[in-house]
Image (spheres, grey):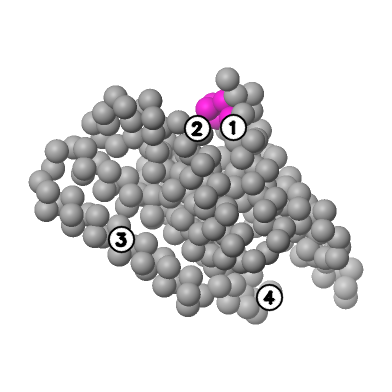
Amino acid sequence: MGIFSGNILKLIAAASMLLDHFGVLFFPKISIFRILGRIAFPIFAFFIAEGCRYTRDKRRYFLTVFSLGVLFQCVYAIVEETPYYGVLITFSLSILLAYALQWFKDCLFAGVKAWKSVLVGALFIALVAGVYALNRAFVIDYGFWGCLAPALVSLTNPPKNAPAWWGKFVDRSLVKLALLGGALVGIWLKTGYSLQVYSLFALPLLFLYSGKRGKWKMKYFFYIFYPAHLALLYGVWFLINL
């Protein structure tokens, strides 16, 4: 039985991200801040997959993440003058991949005609190829494997008319964490960033997930926290360096 609610785990991830970005700006030569910051992405990626599973309005979920990503990207482009695309863009692509994968699974188990399953499968493969091409053309946070991480976790989400064995063998926390761990290793190997290995320490925390959201409704807090904490840190940094 897990002991951490989703809110607690996302608060841990938010604190980790804050320490990471604080270290980047103010103490770039001290590794401990970057090490502590490695657990943020895996936790948020896991809950992006959970969001894709449980959201009542899939379109709204995608548009919320994507709109915030675009808004932040506009501000970031003005401040930094670089073509770097942040993690909200990464997660927007992840959500599209997860939705397409779920559609394909639904077709396979819902008894639809074979041609439709093949067509939807081809569309999913085309989307994966498109996300890969975007990552070759642009600098997107965490790269292709980062975009793939939530989609891999969502692979365990049950399709419509899921057979009984799906819940017993596929939709299990250990399977989810193994898939997420594989994506994290992919990010580590692709980037060659040695500290990325510490992202694997998020997996034991996620293993303690209770499966419950928590008492407080904090969804919009986490949406706003990412751009807000960066705006605050950059503001302090600019004041110090005037």
In whole angstroms, how far apart are the C-alphas of marks 2 and 3?
A: 26 Å
| Rendered image quadrant of residue 212 | top right
Q: Earlier in the sequence, mark 1 or mark 3?
A: 3
In whole angstroms, how far apart are the C-alphas of marks 1 and 4?
A: 37 Å
- Which residue is at 51% across, 75% downward? 138
List the residue tagged with mark 2.
Answer: 173
Q: How many marks do you count on the picture?
A: 4
Q: Which mark is residue 233?
A: none
Q: Can the viewer see residue 86? A: no
In whole angstroms, how far apart are the C-alphas of marks 1 and 3?
A: 30 Å
Find residue 213 and report its horizontal and vertical position in percent: 55, 30
Q: Amino acid at mark 4?
A: Glu
Q: Taking 163 as reference, is 100 above or below it?
A: below
Q: Taking 193 as reference, is 53 above or below it?
A: above
Category of crowding for the residue at label 4, using alpha-carbon neighbours closer than 10 angstroms: few (below 14), some (14–19), many (at least 20): few
- Which residue is at 13% across, 43% downward? 112
Category of crowding for the residue at label 1, using alpha-carbon neighbours closer than 10 angstroms: few (below 14), some (14–19), many (at least 20): some
List the residue tagged with mark 3.
Answer: 125
List the residue tagged with mark 4.
Answer: 80
Q: Give the magenta part as a residue range.
A: 209-214
Q: Amino acid at mark 2?
A: Ser
Q: Earlier in the sequence, mark 2 or mark 4?
A: 4
**In this orientation, which residue lies closer to the viewer: 133 or 240?**
133
CB under 8 Å between callouts 2 and 1? yes
Q: Earlier in the sequence, mark 4 or mark 3?
A: 4
| Rendered image quadrant of residue 219 | top right
